[in-house]
């Protein structure tokens, strides 16, 4: 069956089972591999995308439940002011090591910055606690969010 | 594109091709050389349009090696970092195996295993040929020319030439007979500087490709289920429900694994979940953690093999006065963020794989074996790794992927779910240390350290350790920094059943340093001395290599951590000192312990002497990462075995640190012109002892086991 979804401002007609998680829709159907598989049970945050600007774990969201809400992925978030600011801060402070978790980190951080232009430590904790990094970039993530907020 | 991304220039990172181009184009004459771009050695290629491609012998897995190796090459070649295109090296031990002639990334060795001089010479040799080419073209003495920013300058005649203009002539020059002169470190503009990383821009916008991403959506996908117990074999399978799922195309059934193949990942994963499988239990089905610990503890009572001895330790320890302590560490999973995967195409007399591996030549050999081919018939395309921590030193996933792919028409992306990744891990071994020491006049007089552990080398090679001594298991123990006149270090091999053991970031020193630096604190306490003062005293007169560097680190960390400052109730500081992986590191952990036994590490302060430092910001990042990786393990890391199976399967039951739990970290780098030391692993090995020592300072309770036992710290049980 075909479902039409909006990804980064473009409509995609997706021919896939309606129970397919959005994560695999993006990676296998829409040619967007920036969103990553890390755990499949919404524990690690590597699959984070935005739905109407709000962060969601795409491994846990079925295609049929997306509806008309606009999906933004890591490939598109740089077109938003908060996304661009976060990406710039991530590079200014060299946050990234292996990078596999960082699409999800950037998506969660961008959503935070879009709704809270001056997040404190508690707000950062709350917004980012769902994103695991095994390389241990947490101190730099925190510093980069604050750096982006000041920019 | 954001300004930041364009400022760095467009970085292209390509997977290695067959490597034929680089190998085939050599120095010297011949028609080929005249037509080909300039490729004077295994690492440098320059095209006529001036594009500089650097071939990376070691694999980027977050540690920053693509940038550090590029810095070394770019410095001597005199090109800007922004001009670099990177290419992952093909499988080739001879060209890319460093001084060991064995290609691989790990052991904190990518700089210190000879690559610093090797890559400097590669860059310098290429530069020298370009200068000679320019000199010939202009008819001047090459000694009058200089280079900068990928150009040769003839200042006397007010002219310059871009490297790209010189490649044809440079490629025809005869091979140099002498090594090229190297820059003086005084003149370094790139080496030793915190230059920005080359790989990170692509990692901010989803364009960086990992093994799991290659050909996504363009080829079949196979989701693997391995036998749940090592040694179990398939007894029965009902694949009807799996085959009924839309998109599932076939089920590959082998005796020790099953894979559901589908048109896309979801079909494969859902299909694998829908399989009904029965397994013959095999010899390990009854094994559980209690039995594994029992066998390890029994083994630790044996004499073992002596790894190091000085003085008369047996005699000196024959006293009721001796201090004793046993230390134990659990199985740990690697759990990198990118789960195992390998994309394979087997076709006729060839096999091609796309994956992220730490060991290119081993991966090629294993794929060849599984495919029934020669290594020359196998191509390895290596991608940046989404974390490894030692897991991708193994090639079991390569073999299994090829075994599956042989049954599939065309290319297939073989994937492991997180559950399959964790349950088929090559675990960090369990360890038991038996420690004993005596004091004389307030100093350590005798010291014995027996390590009971599996031999990862044996599991990987199939060969038992030479003379029964697994050197990796005593790494860190046989070269004590401290001056102790009577010492004995011994090893007892003890192999856990039902479990495959593997190399885990920090390897043997994770255990030896935990035991040594915890036990020395116990000795300091018995001697009534401050832990830092006691260590400084024990360094005096020591003949250990670099003991003055260790002492300097220890003094610096005591100062920077505010070692003697007051702390609140149930808070404490702990120190750990080590010389492993070629670097000297002193670490102070500051922790609080609440009434429920929860340990919150507030801060790590480190003083790291790594000798020659290629990128100080990269070194700090590796230290931060290593400390956090080690802290997850110290707080919660514990893989249990039940009925022969690994119990944990995902991040809900294998807990790892999250951002709100991360401590503050301050790293103080001591740099010198000494040989470069490694930095990927030292942070990890410092955590367990420094935190255990901090907990002891905070509560008076000595932790002899990892992970941290909250019940013990809360007073809900006795030691």
Image (cartoon, coloured by chain):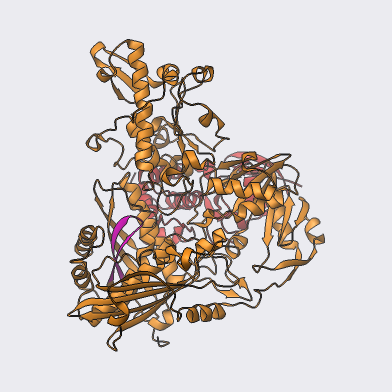
Chain colours: A red, B orange
Any part of residue B660 in sight: yes
Pick whichever, B586 or B403, lies toward us. B403
Image side of residue B548 versus residue B112, left or right:
left
Any part of residue A118 in sight: no
B606 relative to B44, above or below:
below
Image side of residue B458 versus residue B366, left or right:
left
Percent across and percent down for residue B606 are 28, 60
Image side of residue B519 versus residue B207, left or right:
left
Percent across and percent down for residue B343 are 64, 46
B8 relative to B331, above or below:
above
Percent across and percent down for residue B687 are 36, 66
Highlighted range, magenta: B574-590
Image side of residue B207 versus residue B258, left or right:
left
Classify the position of the C terminus of chain B by image quarter: bottom left
User: Which picture quadrant has residue B715?
Assistant: bottom left
User: Which picture quadrant has residue B631?
Assistant: bottom left
Pick whichever, A78 or B553, lies toward us. B553
Percent across and percent down for residue B542 are 21, 65
On whether residue B692 falls in the magenta region, the answer is: no
The secondary structure that most of the magenta stretch takes on is: strand
User: Which picture quadrant has residue B65?
Assistant: top left
B63 relative to B627, above or below:
above
């Amino acid at each position: 069956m075909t479902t039409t979804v909006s990804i980064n401002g473009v409509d995609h007609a997706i021919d896939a089972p309606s129970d397919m998680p959005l994560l695999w829709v993006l990676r296998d159907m829409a040619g967007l591999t920036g969103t990553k598989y890390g755990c499949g049970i919404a524990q690690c945050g590597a699959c984070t995308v935005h739905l109407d600007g709000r962060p969601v774990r795409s491994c846990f969201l079925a295609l049929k439940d997306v509806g008309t809400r606009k999906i933004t992925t890591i490939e598109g978030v740089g077109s938003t002011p908060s996304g661009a600011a976060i990406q710039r801060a991530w590079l200014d402070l060299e946050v990234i090591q292996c990078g596999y978790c960082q699409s999800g980190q950037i998506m969660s951080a961008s959503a935070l910055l879009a709704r809270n232009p001056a997040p404190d430590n508690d707000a950062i904790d709350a917004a980012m606690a769902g994103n695991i990094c095994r390389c241990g970039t947490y101190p730099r993530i925190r510093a980069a969010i604050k750096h982006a907020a000041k920019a | 594109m954001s300004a930041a991304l364009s400022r760095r220039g467009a970085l292209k990172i390509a997977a290695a091709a067959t490597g034929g181009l680089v190998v085939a184009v050599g120095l010297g004459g011949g028609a080929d050389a005249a037509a080909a771009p300039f490729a004077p050695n295994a690492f440098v290629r320059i095209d006529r349009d001036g594009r500089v491609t650097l071939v990376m012998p070691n694999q980027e897995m977050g540690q920053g090696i693509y940038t550090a190796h590029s810095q070394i090459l770019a410095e001597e070649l005199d090109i800007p970092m922004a001009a670099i295109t990177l290419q992952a090296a093909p499988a080739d031990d001879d060209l890319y195996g460093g001084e060991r002639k064995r290609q691989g990334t790990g052991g904190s060795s990518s700089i210190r295993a000879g690559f610093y001089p090797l890559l400097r010479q590669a860059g310098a040799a290429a530069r020298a040929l370009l200068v000679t080419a320019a000199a010939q073209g202009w008819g001047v003495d090459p000694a009058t020319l200089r280079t900068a920013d990928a150009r040769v300058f003839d200042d006397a005649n007010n002219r310059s030439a871009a490297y790209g203009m010189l490649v044809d002539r440079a490629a025809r020059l005869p091979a140099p007979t002498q090594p090229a002169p190297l820059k003086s470190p005084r003149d370094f503009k790139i080496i030793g500087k915190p230059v920005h990383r080359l790989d990170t821009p692509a990692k901010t916008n989803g364009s960086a490709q990992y093994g799991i991403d290659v050909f996504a959506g363009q080829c079949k996908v196979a989701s693997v289920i391995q036998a749940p117990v090592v040694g179990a074999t398939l007894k029965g399978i009902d694949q009807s429900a799996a085959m009924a799922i839309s998109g599932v195309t076939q089920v590959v059934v082998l005796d020790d694994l099953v894979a559901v193949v589908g048109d896309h990942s979801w079909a494969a994963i859902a299909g694998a979940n829908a399989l009904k499988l029965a397994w013959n239990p095999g010899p390990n089905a009854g094994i559980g953690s209690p039995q594994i610990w029992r066998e390890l503890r029994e083994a630790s009572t044996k004499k073992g093999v002596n790894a190091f001895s000085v003085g008369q330790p047996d005699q000196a320890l024959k006293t009721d006065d001796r201090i004793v302590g046993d230390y134990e560490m659990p199985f740990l999973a690697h759990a990198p963020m990118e789960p195992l995967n390998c994309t394979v195409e087997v076709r006729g007399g060839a096999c091609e794989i796309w994956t992220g591996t730490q060991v290119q030549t081993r991966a090629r050999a294993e794929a060849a074996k599984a495919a029934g081919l020669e290594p020359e018939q196998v191509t390895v395309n290596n991608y940046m790794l989404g974390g490894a921590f030692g897991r991708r030193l193994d090639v079991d996933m390569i073999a299994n992927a090829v075994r599956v792919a042989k049954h599939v028409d065309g290319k297939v992306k073989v994937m492991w779910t997180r559950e399959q990744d964790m349950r088929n891990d090559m675990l960090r071994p369990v360890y038991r240390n038996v420690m004993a020491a005596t004091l004389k006049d307030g100093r350590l007089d005798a010291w014995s350290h027996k390590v009971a552990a599996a031999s990862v080398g044996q599991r990987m090679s199939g060969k038992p350790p030479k003379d029964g001594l697994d050197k990796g298991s005593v790494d860190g123990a046989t070269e004590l920094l401290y001056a102790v006149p009577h010492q004995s270090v011994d090893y007892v091999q003890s192999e856990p059943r039902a479990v495959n053991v593997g190399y885990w970031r920090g390897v043997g020193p994770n255990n030896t340093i935990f035991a040594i630096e915890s036990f020395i604190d116990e000795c300091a306490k018995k001697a009534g001395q401050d832990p830092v003062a006691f260590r400084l005293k024990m360094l005096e007169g020591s003949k250990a290599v670099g003991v003055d560097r260790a002492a300097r680190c220890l003094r610096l960390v005591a100062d920077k951590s505010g070692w003697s400052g007051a702390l609140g109730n149930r808070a404490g500081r702990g120190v750990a000192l080590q010389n492993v992986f070629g670097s000297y590191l002193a670490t102070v952990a500051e922790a609080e312990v609440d009434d429920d036994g929860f340990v919150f590490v507030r801060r790590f302060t480190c003083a790291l002497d790594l000798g020659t430092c290629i990128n100080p910001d990269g070194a700090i990042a590796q230290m931060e990462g290593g400390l956090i990786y080690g802290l997850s393990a110290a707080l919660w890391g514990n893989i249990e075995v039940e009925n022969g199976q690994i119990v944990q399967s995902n991040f809900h039951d294998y807990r790892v640190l999250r951002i709100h739990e991360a401590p503050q970290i301050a790293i103080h780098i001591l740099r010198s012109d000494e040989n470069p030391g490694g930095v990927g692993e030292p942070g990890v090995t410092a955590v367990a002892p420094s935190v255990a020592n901090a907990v002891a300072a905070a509560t008076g309770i000595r932790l002899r086991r990892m992970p941290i036992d909250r019940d013990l710290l809360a007073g809900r049980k006795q030691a």
